Image (cartoon, rainbow, N blue to C red):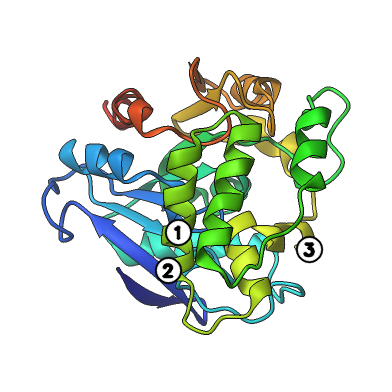
């Protein structure tokens, strides 16, 4: 892993394939937007994409992971800043336009980036996300599953500076959401390990839960602009997702012209590593003539 400087800030990145160790060729690189850290994207998927001949870059958003952190409780950047970061990273990869993919809140960044920087991207993949910002949802979209959210927020907070406690908290949350607790425990521990040494509890919390998004300026709305997108698009959604229920992915697939909807019957909120072959194949197909 390393860092790059774009738009006056430092972003943590990791490269698979191409110059990063295999793959390459003339196919478009793939840029994976974190949600908020790069570990939202399973290693298995990154490796599959690289094996398919792509250079793959996954990265941490501002105020998360190994990217520069200011104050997650009062971010100085906006959703548009994060979208501009994605476009700048696409340019840094070189070789023309880039296949952009976003998961969860990273999918919101990806939608705005594709709308505001269309020349930077060759294809768009959106995983487990929705066409509106955090907060109140549009009346025609399913909101978070009430009982699930109530259980998630009723739990006592862990000591965010205690690695083991944070990992167990993540495993418990995964069980409530219908995700794999063991995978969530391992990922949470990796996220904790990648948080800068000596970081305060709010920074650990932001890295694990993406809480900075609740404080971002996400205006203006972008949903009404989705029909203007003119690039191949794939929408991937877990049938059992209780956080962003399936109707959100269905709406994205309807409103983005020509988008394909891939529903993962066994998936909930997280992208499960066993789904990597199917998801990678669908992503790679977007770039074929």
- Which is more N-terminal, label 1 or label 3? 1
Quadrant assignment, res 222: top right
* Real-space Cα separation, disc 2 to disc 3, in angstroms: 25 Å
What secondary structure is found at the residue carrying circle 3? helix
How many C-alpha atoms fall within 10 Å of the one at disc 3: few (<14), some, or many (≥20)? some
Q: Position of residue 36 (x, y in %)?
A: 56, 57
Residue lying farthest to the top in this orientation: 265
Residue on which the image places disc 1: 189
Q: What quarter of the picture does the C terminus occupy?
A: top left
Residue plotted at (50% across, 27% down): 236
Residue under label 2: 193
Residue at image point 51% right, 48% down: 118
Q: Which image quarter holds the N terminus? A: bottom left
Q: Secondary structure at mark 2?
A: helix
Task: Specify which label sits upstream in the sequence, 2 or 3.
Answer: 2
Proximity of marks 1 and 2: CB atoms separated by less than 8 Å? yes
Give how far across and how far down residue 147 sits, in percent: 81, 29
Q: Residues within 10 Å of mark 2 (few under 14, many from 20)?
A: few
Residue picked out by circle 3: 215
Numbered mark located on residue 158 in the image = none
Asked if residue 75 is positioned above or below residue 256 in the image, the reply reads below
Q: Is residue 44 left or right of residue 25?
A: right
The answer to whether 75 is drawn above or below residue 120 in the figure is below
Q: Residue at x 31, y 46 (%)?
A: 43
Q: CA distance from mark 1 to mark 2?
A: 6 Å
């Amino acid at each position: 892993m390393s860092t790059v400087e774009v738009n006056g800030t430092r972003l943590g990145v990791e490269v698979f394939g191409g110059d990063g160790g295999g793959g390459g060729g003339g196919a478009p690189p793939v840029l994976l937007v974190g949600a908020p850290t790069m570990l939202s994207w399973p290693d298995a998927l990154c490796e599959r994409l690289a094996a398919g001949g792509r250079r793959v870059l996954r990265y941490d958003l501002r105020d998360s992971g190994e990217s520069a952190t200011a104050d997650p409780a009062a971010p100085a950047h906006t959703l548009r800043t994060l979208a501009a970061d994605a476009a700048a990273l696409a340019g840094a990869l070189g070789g023309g336009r880039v296949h952009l993919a976003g998961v969860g809140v990273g999918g919101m960044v990806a939608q705005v980036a594709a709308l505001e920087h269309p020349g930077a991207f060759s294809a768009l993949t959106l995983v487990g996300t929705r066409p509106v910002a955090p907060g109140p949802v549009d009346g025609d979209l399913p909101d978070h599953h009430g009982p699930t959210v109530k259980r998630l927020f009723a739990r006592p907070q862990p000591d965010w500076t205690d690695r083991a406690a944070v990992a167990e908290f993540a495993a418990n949350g995964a069980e409530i959401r219908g995700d794999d607790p063991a995978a969530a425990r391992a990922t949470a521990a990796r996220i904790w390990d990648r948080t800068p040494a000596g970081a305060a509890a709010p920074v650990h919390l932001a890295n694990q839960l993406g809480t900075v998004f609740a404080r971002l300026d996400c205006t203006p709305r972008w949903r009404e602009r989705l029909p203007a997108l003119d690039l191949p698009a794939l929408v991937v959604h877990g049938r059992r997702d209780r956080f962003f229920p399936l109707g959100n992915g269905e709406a994205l697939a309807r409103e983005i012209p020509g988008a394909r909807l891939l529903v993962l019957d066994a998936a909930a909120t997280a992208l499960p590593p066993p789904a990597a072959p199917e998801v990678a194949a669908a992503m790679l197909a977007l770039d074929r003539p």
